[in-house]
Image (spheres, helix red, strand yellow):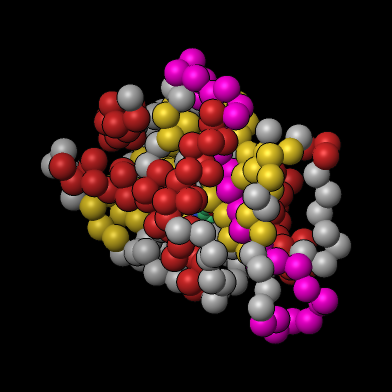
Amino acid sequence: MLYVDGKWVEADELSVHPEDRGYNFGDGIYEVVRIYKGNIYQWEGHLTRLIRSAREIQLELPWTAEELSTIAHELLAKNNITSDDDATLYIQVTRGIAPRVHDIPSNIRPVIMGFVRRKERPLADMKKGITAQIIEDIRWLRCDIKTLNLLGAVLVKQYAKDAGAQDSILHRNGIVTECSAANLFVVKDNELYTHPANHLILNGITRLDVIALAKSNGFTVHEEPFTVDFLKQADEVFSTGTTVEVMPIISVDGQAVGTGQIGPVVKKLQELFEENII
Ligand code: PDD
């Protein structure tokens, strides 16, 4: 069952208004949240980011944080998610419905929609690693906002797939930013490097978890820009995100990363992450 604009409906009962601004402009925000064994993982972090995204696009949410939390938990209950289930929770808010003009209409009422989908963890890929292709970051300059406007992300992922890789690693003028739907880390001499959380990346909930876990286990983490050349000399490369967790990247542009095997630092971080989610 989906939650749409105050009602519980089945997917085939749902219709989208032709002038919903989410549909016309991608004018809205969203979160993808992980459910591990029936429990919502890092809900507070996702909720805080949803509220921030709304503020950054001048969308006034008519729901309190408590009401949004209730909707999220009811989605689990209505879909019979139990402690046997791993799943994802998707929640989006569009600006609402109004005759199509580019500026923001006054007195517009946001439309909320949420659903849950049972989904296995990406354990096989986490064990063997994935391949990536370096692609120019063609997205806009507010990647810190989790907006529905994802055409840049769609295209860069497709360019990577067209080149025979599983994901894209994005760069702007030679500086590595992140992946199409995940953050990126490299390991050099046992220290971690990742792009700082500014307007050029989404500050991932998993990214923040991994930084905290790494630091509390004695690793130095540099949140600073680094180049594609630096990445190509790295000992290990991995991405983080709600859907990929801690994902080793074992080849970039067809060249092996480090030894071409999953490295010890990423293995350690996977173990720490595993302990954190259960
Ligand atoms: N994407 N960077 C981008 C561009 C993302 O879209 C995402 C998540 C992340 C990782 O953030 P988090 O750890 O909070 O999931 C980083 C979601 C999963 C998606 O759009 O499907």
Q: Is residue 52 above or below residue 74?
A: below
Query: Is residue 133 at least partly visible in the picture?
Result: no
Residue nearest the viewer, comparing 208 with 5 = 5
Q: Is residue 121 left or right of residue 2?
A: left
Q: Determine the residue positioned at 68% across, 33% down.
A: 1
Query: Which span of residues is magenta-colored?
Result: 78-106
Q: Residue 195: which quarter of the image?
A: bottom left
Q: Residue 88: which quarter of the image?
A: top right
Q: How many marks?
A: 0
Q: Determine the residue positioned at 63% across, 54% down.
A: 112
Q: Is residue 144 above or below residue 221?
A: below
Residue furthest out toward the top: 84
In the rendered image, the quadrant that contains the C terminus is top left
Q: x, y percentage for residue 28? A: 63, 64
Q: Determine the residue positioned at 65% across, 43% down.
A: 3
96 within the magenta span: yes
Q: Is residue 32 above or below residue 94?
A: above
- Magenta stretch: helix, strand or loop mostly: loop
Residue nearest the viewer, comparing 56 with 184 = 56
Q: x, y percentage for residue 252? A: 52, 45
217 within the magenta span: no
Query: Is residue 214 at least partly visible in the picture?
Result: yes
Q: Is residue 52 above or below residue 265?
A: below
Q: x, y percentage for residue 44? A: 37, 48
Q: Is residue 57 left or right of residue 14?
A: left
Q: x, y percentage for residue 268? A: 27, 30
Q: Determine the residue positioned at 45% across, 58% down.
A: 64
Residue nearest the viewer, comparing 148 with 255 = 148
